[in-house]
Image (spheres, rainbow, N blue to C red):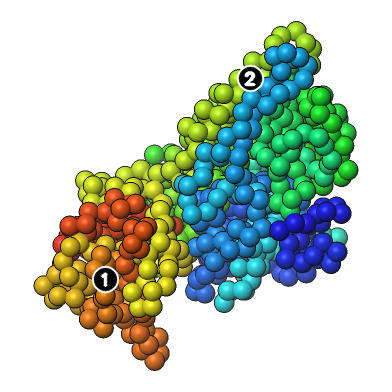
Amino acid sequence: MQFHLNGFKPGNYQVPDSARKAYPIPPIADLPTTVDVLIVGTGPAGLTMARQMSEFSDVKTCIVDMAEGPLLFGRADGISCRTIEIMEAFNSAEMVEKETYKLMQNTFWEPDTANPNNIKRKYKIADARLGMSEFKHGIVNQARLHELLLDGMANTMTNLRPHYSRELLDLEIDETLTQDLDAHPITATFKRVDDAGNGKIETVKARFAVGADGGRSRVRKSLDIALEGDSADKAWGVMDILLNTDFPDIRVKSFIQSKDHGAVMTIPREGGYLIRFYVELDLIDKNKRATDIKLTETDIIAKAQKIFHPYTLDVKEVAWWSIYSVGQRLADRFDNRAANSADDIIPRAFVAGDACHTHSPKGGWGLNTSLPDTFNLGWKMAAVLQGKSKPALLATYTTERRKVANQLINADKELSRIVATRPTAGDGSAKAEVDTAKIETFMKRQSGFVSGTSIEYFPSYICTAQENQDLATGYKIGQRFHSAEANRVADGGIQHLGHLVKADGRWRIFVFGGAQDPTQTSSNAHQLAEFLAKDPTSPVQKYTPKGADIDAVIDTYAVFQQHDLSMHDLHGYLWPAKGKYGLRDYEKVFQPQEDNDVYDIRGIDRHSGCIVIVRPDQHIASILPITAHAELSKFFDVFMIEQT
């Protein structure tokens, strides 16, 4: 898709440039006085949390932001393949895939040894993240991703929409009520900041709160959570521009190092014409912020033109620009509990995204770490509010996501160090220190983390049974369920197995059958289905509410190696009767493709088969033998609440 030919226009890219209009400012409605979940901030973390909560009609959610309306310009641009996998869980990946610019190559430029005042390409390589997912790393305006999340919220039964033009003044927690799950211990006070609101004060009481309100988070400060780390001492300019140039790699992601003027990183944007530039600037005094630097987009362009010599940059339009500083900070806690609290202490307020980890934007980690923060938290909070899981489950958010944030901070420190030149560029007193080979090595080594596909949670009661890893070596316990295609038995349709794990709060059990014929009642697969369907100790029987569909809480799928199977010869649990008419679901059983066999590509034991338990956030929770009925029940018994 191509757009922005005659100037940058925000909005829905399915609408032609000539007809596209900016989003109108949404109307103002009063805040609710009492909610289950209060979300502060409409960035990637806040909107992902709201999008997840919007799936549950029995959870009352409110999301609030100080801005007057949805984001229109700039900020993050990179959409990792793991983020697109998450968007697939929200049924939005198709549009992201259609509109993003796919990063296929990287180029590295250094001073020309024959003429050091000029830059010269050192090499061009394929992007290191190719093949890590069925999706490719893409580039798109963050505002467009926001729009897809907003549309998804509005189109659910809850019709959830943000409340804009509110400044959070204070957030207080009544500590005497925090361990009463039915109480509303949180009191949040907001002020209207629109002209019509005239400073009106509004108060919301909530059972839980999520602060996704950025690096200067008022929620974090209200919870007295410290943000620790290094202060920034380096400034970079960032801008989205439309330009003409004779630089040959303008539509390829490029790392460019000059002799005397610093570095530039270029990222081609969606639509075929727009380009993002990250331009190295100078040192910042210790007591100053990036916003104190008195530079404009004209200064950033002039600096870039020096770095690109001998190539020319004729900038026609600057769609958005900013100056930011490089600093890495991490919150000491991700929830309101005191440090080292026991898991049975119920947390009631959480921080996510930039509110608990700040860093430079060059690695593309901001949005791609913030969004999974609340994708991790959302299903847990819903399960607790709905009485499906024990409140202790909420403590795993901090354990799992703070580990990822710490990895992010360390990676960003390294990247910032190897991308930047000497502290003050332009004085000509020293040779540039950047070695583009080090950048390439870093990107290859960190490709799994950058793509989000190698994110792995600590072993815990929701990531367990590592002793069974050899039953499916390609499904790493703790990492996301790496999708692979299989053929549906009922109709031969091709299905990505990972795309079956939607963001609806349900657990998935994937049964990969062994060598035995699953149509035989004596087979392990048939016996497992019988256990799940009828045994009173089965997690399906214990944790599915009476009268609900059999897959309402735990959704089971099966993959069998045998061909020429008939659905009606398999156990009825695998083609269950559902809904008010008792219609049969024929989309739960699959077989491997001949030339793309999931057993081969995911290292599944063909003789024994296995059970793969997948969490609602698509991460693998456990792998068990097909015969491990008691162990399967025990896994769920630790944290789920029996439905009576």
Question: Residue 38: where, in percent of width, then height?
Answer: 58, 60
Question: Residue 123: where, in percent of width, then height?
Answer: 61, 28
The image shows residue 437, relative to residue 27, as above or below, that is above
Residue toward you, 494 or 317: 494
Q: Which SS class for mark 2?
A: loop
The kind of residue tagged 1 is: His
Residue receiving disc 2: 434
The kind of residue tagged 2 is: Val
Question: Residue 44: where, in percent of width, then height?
Answer: 61, 53
Residue located 25% across and 65% down the image: 561
Residue located 81% across and 24% down the image: 310
For the question of whether residue 321 can be seen, the reply is yes
The image shows residue 475, relative to residue 543, as above or below, that is above
Q: Mark number for residue 563? A: 1
| Number of marks drawn | 2
Residue toward you, 206 or 294: 294
The image shows residue 530, relative to residue 352, as above or below, that is below
Q: Earlier in the sequence, mark 1 or mark 2?
A: 2
Q: Mark number for residue 7? A: none
Q: Viewed as shown, does residue 33 lie left or right of 506?
A: right
Quarter of the image for residue 239 reads: top right
Q: Viewed as shown, does residue 616 lie left or right of 259?
A: left
Residue toward you, 302 or 256: 256
Residue located 71% across and 58% down the image: 1
Which quadrant is the C terminus positioned in?
Answer: bottom left
User: How crowded is the residue under tag 2: few (<14 C-alpha within 10 Å), some, or many (20+)?
Assistant: many
User: How crowded is the residue under tag 1: few (<14 C-alpha within 10 Å), some, or many (20+)?
Assistant: few
